[in-house]
Image (spheres, rainbow, N blue to C red):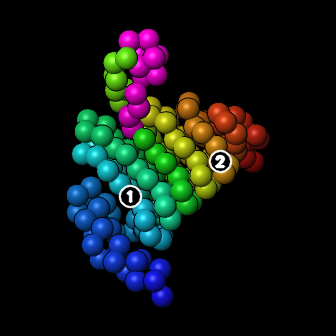
Amino acid sequence: MFYRLLNALFKIVVYRGYYKKYNLIKSFKFNGYLIRISGDGKITVGENSYISFYSYINVVEGSHLTIGSNVSIAHNVKIYTSSFIASELVSTGVKKLYVGDVTIGNNVLIGSNCFICPSVNIGDNVVVGANSVVTKDLSSDTVYGGVPARIIRKVK
């Protein structure tokens, strides 16, 4: 009962705000509750895509997240368009921000608990296995997994 009420509240208040703020198309679905989007960047989504429970998107000003058509984003996935430059922080103590666009192609499945770093392009027809960390571009027609994500096999 509590989760139904929470989900209804999120759909009415939060998700409607996301559709308006980021100009999301109506076929993009929020499949669950506690899905958060923050930042003043731009988001473009294709038809019939969804994001699931507990996921988080950070799209900072000046960056762009593109999600293709027929994309399934499982629960607890994190997508960032910015990050601190660790070497700068450690060597100088200065928090210098790195910003990069993220592009997710068509017909992509992103498994639960994945982390997608800034400046990553994921091709079409890609599967990203659960618990993977995507730090570099992923080519089309391939299954990836691991930390960092590596090729497991080609899709036939």
Give the mark nearest the N terminus, 2 or 1: 1
Left or right of 20 on screen, residue 30: right
Q: Is residue 7 above or below residue 22?
A: below
Q: Quadrant of residue 83?
A: top left
Visible residue check, residue 121: yes
Find the residue positioned furthest to the bottom. 1
Left or right of 108 on screen, residue 28: left
Q: Is residue 131 above or below residue 16?
A: above
Residue 131: image tag: 2
Visible residue check, residue 42: no
Residue in view at x 45 percent, y 17 percent: 90
Q: Nearer the viewer, residue 114 or 2?
A: 2
Q: Amino acid at mark 1?
A: Arg
Left or right of 56 on screen, residue 97: left
Label 1: element kind: strand
Find the residue positioned furthest to the front. 93
Residue 84 is inside the magenta segment: yes
Q: Position of residue 26 (x, y in %)?
A: 34, 69
Q: Position of residue 64 (x, y in %)?
A: 33, 41
- The region drawn magenta spans 81-92
Q: Position of residue 149 (x, y in %)?
A: 65, 36
Q: Nearer the viewer, residue 152 or 96?
A: 96
Residue 132 is inside the magenta segment: no
Label 2: element kind: loop
Asked whether the residues under the numbered discs 2 and 1 touch, taking CB atoms below 8 Å apart as contact, a structural biologist would say no
Q: Amino acid at mark 2?
A: Asn
Residue in view at x 54 percent, y 56 percent: 76
Report which residue position mark 1 lands on: 36
